[in-house]
Amino acid sequence: MPGSRRHAALLFALAPAALSLSCAENKPASQEIANSTGGAANAADGSASGAANTPGTGGSSGDPTGAVQPLRRLTHEEYNNTVRDLLGDTTRPADAFPGETSGGSGYSTPGTFSNIDARSYLDAAESLAASAALRTADLAPCTAGQTGESACFDAFLSKFGRAAFRRPLTDAERAELTGVYATFRAVPETTYADGIQVVLSAMLQSPQFLYHWELGATPAGVPGPGKLIALTDYELASRLSYFLWSSMPDEALLSRAEAHALTRPSELAAEAQRMLLDPRARATVRDFHRQWLDLDSLAHNVKDPVAFPGYTNELRQSMREETMAFVESVFFEGNARFDTLMTAPFSFLNESTAKLYGIAGVTGNALRRVELKSSERAGLLTQASILSTHANAYEGSAILRGKLIREHFINCSPLPPPPNNVPKLPAPVAGVSQREQLAMHSTVEPCRTCHSLMDPIGFGFSNYDAIGGVIPAAGPTPIDTTGFIEGLDGARVSFSGAPELAALLAQSEQVRRCMARQWFRFALRRAEVSEDGPSLDASYQSFAASGFDLTKLLISIAESPAFRLRKVATGEVTQ
Amino acid sequence: MNSKFSRRAILQALGVSAAFLPLLQARVGVSANSTLPKRLVLMAWPNGVIGDAFWPAGGFPMADPASFTISTDEQSVLKPLIPHQNDILIVGGMTYPNQKQGGGHASMPFMFTGVDGAAINGTISDGVPLSAGGPSVDMFIADEFAKASKTPIHSLQLQCIKQNGNDRFISFHGSALGGQPNAPEPETDPVRLFDRLFGGAALTSDRLARIRAARKSVFDYLGRDLEAFGKNMGTEDRQQIDQHLASVRQLEQELQAFTATCSAPTRPDASLDYVNSQYTPLIPTVHKLQADMVVTALACDLVRVASLLWSNSSNWGYSFFWLGDEFITGRDADNAGSGGPLRQHHEIAHHAYTDAAHTRRKNLVDQWFISQFAYIIERMKQYHEPDGTTLLDQSAVLCANVFAEGASHRITDLPWVLAGSCGGYFKTGQFLRWVGGKADENVSNTGLLTALCQAMGVNVDRFGDPQYFVDLPALRA
């Protein structure tokens, strides 16, 4: 059918055109290529860059700006942690919920509400409530004869309601929930504990529990769409705890909210400081890096069993734990500096990973801190977890490794997909390096436009195999690990080997700004928009002023207007 | 009950073993009834086909569309449908005229909606930020059915492997909402599906009554709570809450309507990890469990509309262990970048047009998907309506590929096959193909989508974007 072929040819012609356009728009000096939020993201970048050129303002001069914060539900991680902290339940019920999307932020969040969600929340709430009701004596104590049952219920509602809804209940809510209790209690042969169980199930399915929802204190006058309103103390307490702990506020934080002692940035910063010392912050730091670096893909990563018989579940688990232990150590035991994260010549190994890294004398399953050869390993990027997930079954992949760095560290946004009808790569030939194989990428369109942004970075990792081991040179000539980064801070920068590459990235303003954006997206679970420019810039300035201390970055995000204010949405009724 | 499908007849049928099922044909002619309920099943498989192995001999312009022959060659994709030749309608020459973005990449939302896409946040796995711009035909029909007479379950959306990306939907409530696809979450877990459809059967009536009382007070509260919660929100947020409320209402209705009368198949083995496994040999097991449960649920009139997404185009983690060694490993460059030494449909499809070994694999993979379609057809023929027709005769079952051709992502001359005449509406036993020799001689898929609505008794003149609509009278009996 000539007609069909013509149509196909047209599509084929269009796709690379669109592709070249997107990748060609990569203007390193302006930090970003267009990302999914299109014009808005570019605008955000524009304002951020503008403010960056005026030292001293910190981007916070002038009127504060904020963005609409779309309604979102607790993530699966947040749900699991919240029921752990609220009910002491560690069964992680949300692991069985339907999949999440990465939205515009790149960090997981549930999608639009569906029937299966309703079913999942019902199942989880009923099961959690049934377990909790077995412990009514702790949760809702009521000694028969001591006080009336309704007084016991009232006391339970006040205490538990404030924790579950993360603020005191309103009178209307109290009346509703008392109604739920009384209705079911009227069914014959029900007990006090049964009544508590039904109320628990109701509260765990309430939108007040399931959603992040912030009304804000309405300023004088009636703000219309686009006007800013400041979040209340309780709302800030929730935002802060879900940002830093991925869980509900603790009693100390709720008390601060109750005392109206959270609305000033300095008060938020002080609480953030306290909360970062809590073990719950470690879990959040792990979760961020798990998502940023896509460590979940390790679980289903498969290698050629002949070439890599040692690539077992146990080894993959050790690789993942290495990265988790490393980021925890940098943040909480070390100096928390970005360049440490990127270039540290140490890591946390057990016997299996030490063997892979060629380190003698490490035995047993427990991880321990090990100093590494600085010519071989530097920070996150040379860890086996990342090297083996960015590789194919037989060898490392310059494309995937370069793509990771381009998208997640430099451009901070995804490159366009390959066009239709990508021709097959020639089969590997003994004695021909991947670099030689990929040579066509640097000359042939439409490959060149995008691959020139990826492959030359990935070539720096040519001496690591498919599972992250160092490949010894076959002869007197060392393996060629030279490469370059097109458009890093507006320049083309050459390097030799991954440690040099890591050092370049660690010192780059573009990469440091990307780091700040990644945490900002994680904190607010949305892509940045133009109004976030000043907040992003202020956070970056604090980050810079601290010598790029990552904990300071987190605190400065919590202090920023984007975190404390929200813009009234279209169609919203404010009271 | 008399005017509907006889649930008791089904229970009796289910009570006997499959070996006795042919005897049921003796019940033909119990009551002639022209208002039997209609059912719709949509299923989708990805990555196009190789046209030569797919299309029967003949094609446009055919003197006699009923005289087609499906090849019996080893690689003949439609071979599993040979026993059902009189019950199918092979429909070639259709396209998605609205899909103008992403070079075919983001076509899944166009399959059953027939309208322009809508932008969503972030990127779907292939980088094109696009989702559906309107409701899919199955959701539209299920909504219309719900207005007339409610089945316990509004509709089913199933998928084989749990996924997190935005390209895991073929069924849509409507246009993207708040930058997210507005789609019901597909169920992947056969055990959870079983409990939803047949779970109440295990409960005693006392226990059921008590659970219902507890749930009733909770649902009453949630309804008021959600209404109050969403009342003052911005437009997009309020739509989310409306969706939440509608889902809770639907769940409440499902749970209330549920009776323990419909005889269930055996509960799937709950110890297997159906949902989270990648590269799992359990995929055929999940396919069969889902097919059996869907067909039983349709036969029991628990639900009348279902969609099954067997896999999306990236079909990551989907290797065909059960087709033989050459589908499992291949030490060549085909898998470079795909993350494993296991062959995947995606890689096979990209190279199938230039490499003979992959051509054969591609055809056998597509033939396997078609055999899954044939299994559903067979199962639906085993149930009989009171008038002696089969469940299939009262249904429209559409098996559709998102592309025509995998490597090029071509979306003209889509390989779609419909089974079941839907109460005599469709003229089955035909091979139709609206392709003369020019791309613009493809017809919009909205002609077929509209015919599906009309076959279901849902009267719309044009489903989807009316500007490309072409009526297709050849489909009709």
Image (cartoon, coloured by chain):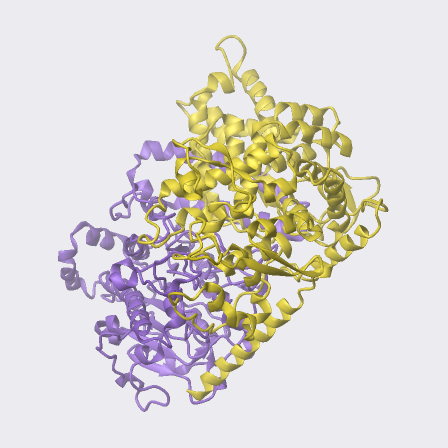
In the image, the chain rendered in purple is: B
Residue at horizontal 19 percent and vertical 49 percent from the top: B15
Q: Nearer the viewer, residue A226 or A196?
A: A226
Q: Position of residue B205 (x, y in %)?
A: 31, 35
- Residue A429 placement, left or right of A374: left
Horizontal and vertical percent position of residue B134: 54, 64
Residue B166 against residue A295 in the figure, above or below: below
Q: Is residue A494 above or below residue B466?
A: above
- Is the residue B209 above or below the residue A147 in the image? below
Classify residue B406 as left or right of residue A110: left
Residue B64 is situated, as x and y percent measured from the top left of the image, at 30, 88
Q: Nearer the viewer, residue B99 or A518?
A: A518
Residue at the extreme top: A146
Image chain in yellow: A
Q: Is residue A20 above or below residue A174?
A: below
User: Residue, x 31% and y 67% (percent of image)?
Assistant: B365
Quadrant of the rendered image containing residue B351 = bottom left
From the viewer's perspective, is B463 left or right of B335?
Answer: right
Residue B252 in sight in this render:
no
Q: Nearer the viewer, residue A233 or A196?
A: A233
Question: Is there any visible trace of residue B14 in the rendered image?
Answer: yes
Q: Residue visible at 54% across and 63% down?
A: A455
